[in-house]
Image (cartoon, rainbow, N blue to C red):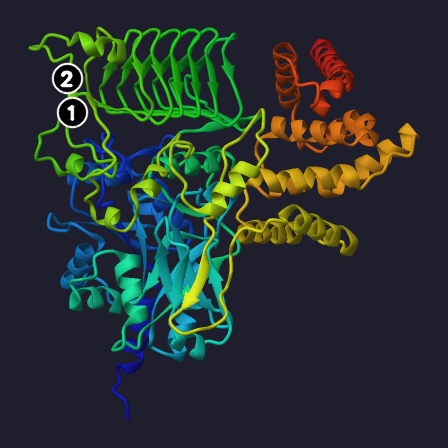
Amino acid sequence: MPPKNAGKEQGSAEEEEEILKAVVLADSFNSRFGPLTVDLPRCLLPVCNAPLLDWTFEALATAGVQEVFVFCGSHVSLIKEAINASRWSRPNSGLKIVPIFSGEARSVGDAMRELDTKQIISSDFVLVTGDVVSSVRIDEVVKEHKERRKLSKDPIMTMVMREVGPRDRPRPGSDATIVTVDAETSQCVHYDYIRHGKDSFQIPAEVLKSHPDLDVRIDLLDCSIDICTPDVPALFTENFDYQELRTDFVKGVLTSDLLTKTIFCHIAGKGYGARVKNTRAYGDVSKDIICRRTFPLVPDDNHPSGDAYELRNGLIYVAKQDVLLSRTCKIERHSMIGPKTEVRDEARINASVIGRSCDIGRRSVITDSYIWDNTRIGSNCLVQESIIGSGVTILDGSRIVRGCLIGKGVVLGPEANLRPFSRVTRSKPSQEDERWSDDEDGETGPEKSVGEPEQAIDDTLVPILGSKSRAYLWTEEEDGDSDEENEVETPQSLRLGRLGDKGSDVEIVESAASEMESDEESSDFGSPRSAASGTSVTTSEPIAALSLDSSSDFASECKQSLERAYEEGHTIDNATIELKTLRMASNVPLKQVAESIVQFLVSKVTPSGDAASDRKAINQHNERWSPLLSSIGWDDPPEAIFMLQRYCARNPSYQKSFGQILAAWYNQDVIEFDDIKTWYSRMLQMKKTGLDSSDPLASTIDDSMQQAVKLIQHIHELEQEDESDEEEEDDGP
């Protein structure tokens, strides 16, 4: 007979297994956010006015995690204070948070070996970095992982990935990750990291023999979420060469002749997941939160900071606590204003996040930037595509342009004029400070100092930093990457990871990319380009190559794809998937896909001469298919109007349909009133500068503008009627 307490022990074990645990790696083990991370760890950087770590806790709690171990080796006291201040530390939060402190870890491998030594993990657990924002149903991935474990003990890890969106795609000149999975089982059989300049990679012949049906994926974004067994920390302990999780551990396990362990890949069909691994990702994730791609993690619903926000038209979030907005200031789309912040007369904020207790001066302009708490910006300042740390003072007339990082407590101005990608800190870190000596951009020391009380101000820096500045300006050297991740990534790829870097100053060596850019028509409203690196596959034995090079007839293939979708009645989602796949295989910019969609939206309705029937057909067709533009990720409506205008100009039979299609797009929320006005103002400017007589636009621009004016007047009349109705309701009994 079994022991009397056997059933009780079995029940206890099952109960313990039901508790889902997670390990959060709070250290980033690199310095890509310096000087912002001199005084603050990356996991505590504010994203949409809440610490990154709180967004990570939110994701874990939503997924059903009950116990979280936070591993940290630097800024220990700050992380401990943040955990204690987090609402997830309250007894009734449903989440138990246990900090683990270690000053010895210098890499992910060291952290995993430390976990194995402490023996605090005895069952399957979720492994995430402390800079992850996710709405993926992690509990479902855990369930899938455990089902595999019931069949075999060989699976030790499930990596969570998702298909890339338009803003996630690697740009020309960047590196690429190749994930090869078994099409039937989702087992990851090969993992490779292709550095810029390489146009091929190898899959071992034995992999192809044992897995005849493979999916080679270059369109996946690593969510930095893994479901692991206790074997994972143990394997790190057994092999001290394992330092990085992907390039060392995953590749090592997959290529080992001794280990029989397997790794699987879960491709999330729903939900959002991304890591804030560099300043470009910081901007992308912030915009994704504001644009509600992270739903249900959105600012106006249970914000992680505890502050309440009101959602306004244009995806504008304004805190409900003591915000002062001048009647003449402009808060434009995709912006966020924190509590106790004041925006003064004629200031303009566009696609930016303003923190708590900030002061934005008169006639200052802030675009695509992130202003942290307690910052003061004077009058007539310009801040563009930059991150401004907490407690910064920017005096009147200063210009901070793309890619600048301003550290805590810096004083700049008046009339400071920083160069792009400048990095400024209040004081000079010690020469031994590793956080600076191993930065990915190679900053090795300060250029010159300004503003120390005991030093005279250097006159050569006054035009750059301002006469009343208190700051150190750091130089950028392209060579000098020495942290662990930089040994994998190329300097070019690292540069493209900077906020505000469009890749225009990076030399592209791939002939395919060069041909693509030289053949592409320039746009008057040119939006940032993005495309996947063209990559071919070879193996260690002669087999048919899987070519992924750019297709010269992409426009024809895209047209055929849209025709099939139209004739066969595909859903918008299915049509979008086909277009994204075609774009990835052909290595073309998103603009080219948008142009094909605009052509499809126009050309499928042939003008009959009867305005009423044409209007009805145009409305029906665009109601059905115009959502394709937003589904592929196109986010430049004025540029879409320009594409429409150019296509109609080149095809005179459609010129009279321009205004009708514009109205249909407005009614379907493809464009907004402000987008039409933006396009119209640019047309006025284009007329002033003059057009080449050979350009089809030259002969049709007046007609297009006249058709647009009719729509603008009609919208104005509707708005006035709405205002009148509201006034009558207010005056009613």
Q: Residue at x 33, y 68 (%)?
A: 17
The quarter of the rendered structure image containing the C terminus is top right
Q: Residue at x 37, y 30 (%)?
A: 49
Give amino acid for label 2.
Answer: Ser
Q: Cβ–Cβ below 8 Å for labels 2 and 1?
A: yes
**Residue 4, above or below 53:** below
Q: CA distance from mark 2 to mark 1?
A: 7 Å
Q: Residue at x 15, y 51 (%)?
A: 105
Mark 1 surroundings within 10 Å by alpha-carbon count, few (fewer than 14), some (14 through 19), many (20 or more) = some
Q: Position of residue 447 (x, y in %)?
A: 17, 22
Q: Which element carries disc 2, helix, strand or loop? A: strand
Q: Which element carries disc 1, helix, strand or loop? A: strand
Foreground pick, 233 / 724: 233
**Residue 84, above or below 330:** below
- Where does label 1 land, which residue? 446
Foreground pick, 685 / 689: 689
Check residue 686 in the rendering and tell me which mark sits there, or answer none: none
- Where does label 2 land, which residue? 449
